[in-house]
Image (cartoon, grey):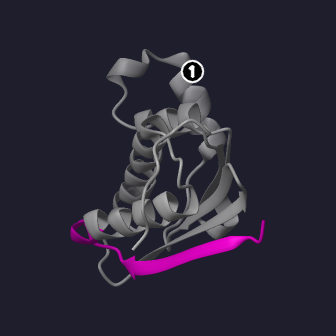
Amino acid sequence: MKAQLFKKTFPSELKFIRTVISEIMDYLRCSFPSLSSEDYFDCKLIYNELLINAIIHGNENDKNKTVSVTIEVIDEDSIYSTITDEGNGFDYNHMLKEIENKDRLFLENGRGIQLVQSLTNELHYERSRKQISFYKRMNRNGQNFSCR
């Protein structure tokens, strides 16, 4: 299977999230015609969490900065995706340790990353590039979607 690529850069404003996620989900439905409803929901949640984090925490709601998302279809059932912002980065490992050491339900920060980590097969953070990337394998038992 030839690798397919989705790329989108948008202004760091929450009002663009719905449109960008809609474009992402259209791309995934067309790339995976048998995408299960579970994977559809998981991907929508993953992108929602990561894009909002990039805008609010990464770019600190600075409308002059941008957020970029890329998705590479690796094979018939998996994707590799990156979200990049223009912020200062954060200590990903420290945050994960903090999550493990506290009652997770009462944390003010970190629940989104923890949720994303549970829904992906691999999650990597590259502080120097202010980039988070993940690998996700899709179920093969799903519905057929038609592409426009």
| Amino acid type shown at disc 1 | Glu
Quadrant in the picture for residue 141 = top right
Q: Percent from the top left, x then y, of residue 22?
A: 33, 64
Position of 95 compared to 2: left or right?
A: left
Q: Residue at the bottom extreme?
A: 64
- Whether residue 125 appears in this view of the structure is no
At x 48% / y 67%, what residue is drawn? 27
**Residue 70 percent location from the top left of the image:** 58, 70
Looking at the image, which is closer to me, 20 or 34?
Answer: 34
In the image, is 75 to the left or to the right of 142? right
Q: List the residue tagged with mark 1.
A: 100
**Residue at 57% of width from left, 36% of height from top?**
117
Element type at marker 1? helix
As for residue 36 lying within the magenta part, the answer is no
Q: Residue at x 56, y 30 (%)?
A: 118
In the rendered image, is residue 65 in sight? yes
Q: Which residues are magenta?
A: 1-16
Image spot of residue 65 (x, y percent): 40, 80
**Residue 61 sits in which quadrant?**
bottom left
* Residue 14 covered by magenta stretch: yes
- Counting from the top left corner in percent of width and height, residue 46 is at 46, 47
Q: Is residue 86 above or below residue 117?
A: below
The relative height of residue 130 versus residue 123 in the rendered view (above or below) is below
Closer to us: 17 or 102: 17
